Image (cartoon, helix red, strand yellow):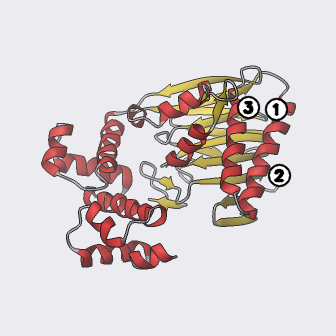
Amino acid sequence: MQIHNPGDKDGEYFNLDSVYMLTLESFSEQDQVLQHAMAAPGFYLPRTGVVAQEYTPGIRPLHRHAQIELMYVMNGVITQYIEDDCRVYHEGECCILNKNVRHVEAYSSDFEAVFLMLSDDFLHRVIEQDVVFQNFREYSSNPSPLYQELIRMQGEASAFQKEYINFTPVGNAQDLTEKAEALLMKILQETVRQESGFISIVSGLISRFLALLSDSDCYYMSRISMHSTREDYLFNRVMLYLRKNTGRINYDELETLMYYSRDYLNRIVKKRSGKTLGELAKEICLEKAATQLKETDKSVSEIIHTLGYTNRSYFYRIFQEKYGITPAEYKKK
């Protein structure tokens, strides 16, 4: 996972370089020690402990993610600062944060929690592959209300909204926590072992976990919408434009679409991301190239052409500056 603009109270954000990542985190108020373990396909960080300070706005700024993040409290109490709001979550409670929401958890009381980040493509596959059979021959997509919310959160309109979903236990919190913990720990174990077929198994386990959350006999689900500023709105519109165009910018077109000059838009982007429009566009384009190198059979030449680069040497140079190796070496690795 990459942390962009660390320490910037407006522009810090985390970008997951994987289809999903699970983090197991716990905090001891008495010892002031935070322990965490992380696992993602091809990556595992065993449980380690670090000295943690109690949440102080000037020390730990709010951040956002490039992916949807789910937090589930297995033990204790955890406080989340979400934009201008403060939410306290107890054992068995959960929230799903949209990628546009800035937040940070406070290290102020004993807790054990799981954080699960899901890329848009992976979450889409999880939902798409979870089907309901009406009989032996006919099946349809799962009509889960939570799935509908997650699909909506992936849509264009949601890119301009600050929102998150809360889940409050309806039944016995301890019983629900045991069920949820069993599923989450299986996800962790499968990810660490990385045996054949583990991605498909993890996808099924995530489906079962989301089914538990969407069961109205187990959880009450509520969507919280928050206010977005004009700068938030403009920045997200620019990001949507850049992602739609894989980082290629037509400045005249951008000014026409946004009704603002490129200089003003550049100031907004710089303030929010720490990068200029050009730098951010190049980063998005290179990330798209890296994804195609990993997930398709396209040659390097085909990818360069698809992304609109005419100077092969320039593309090789900027790719190597970002990833430390050439596109061909990246594809082979």
Quadrant including the N terminus: bottom right
* Residue that badge 3 annotates: 212
Left or right position of 102 against 315? right
Instruction: State the image coordinates of residue 237 (x, y, percent, origin top left).
Output: 31, 40
Judge depth for marks 3 and 1 and give the one in front: 3
Q: CA distance from mark 2 to mark 1?
A: 27 Å
**Label 3 or label 2, whichever comes before in sequence order:** 2
- At horizontal 52% and vertical 76% (from top left) the residue drawn is 333
For image coordinates 39% across by 66% down, the residue present is 298
Pick out the residue farthest to the left: 252
Helix, strand or loop at label 3? It is helix
Q: Amino acid at mark 2?
A: Gln
In the picture shown, does residue 161 fall above or below 263?
Answer: above
Q: Badge 1, how many Cα within 10 Å: few under 14, some, many 20+?
A: many
Kindly identify which residue carries mark 1: 176
Where residue 247 appears, as percent x and y from the top left, is 29, 56
Q: Earlier in the sequence, mark 3 or mark 1?
A: 1
Q: Which is nearer the eye, 321 or 206?
A: 206
Choose mark 2 or mark 1, whichever is in front: 1
Q: Please state if 299 lies on the left or on the right of 184 as rendered.
A: left
Q: Which mark is residue 150?
A: none
What whole-number distance in Å separates the C-alpha atoms at marks 3 and 2?
33 Å
Q: Position of residue 182 (x, y in %)?
A: 82, 44
Residue 124 appears in the rendering: yes
| Nearest to the observer: residue 210 or residue 232 | 210
From the image, tell me which residue sits under label 2.
30
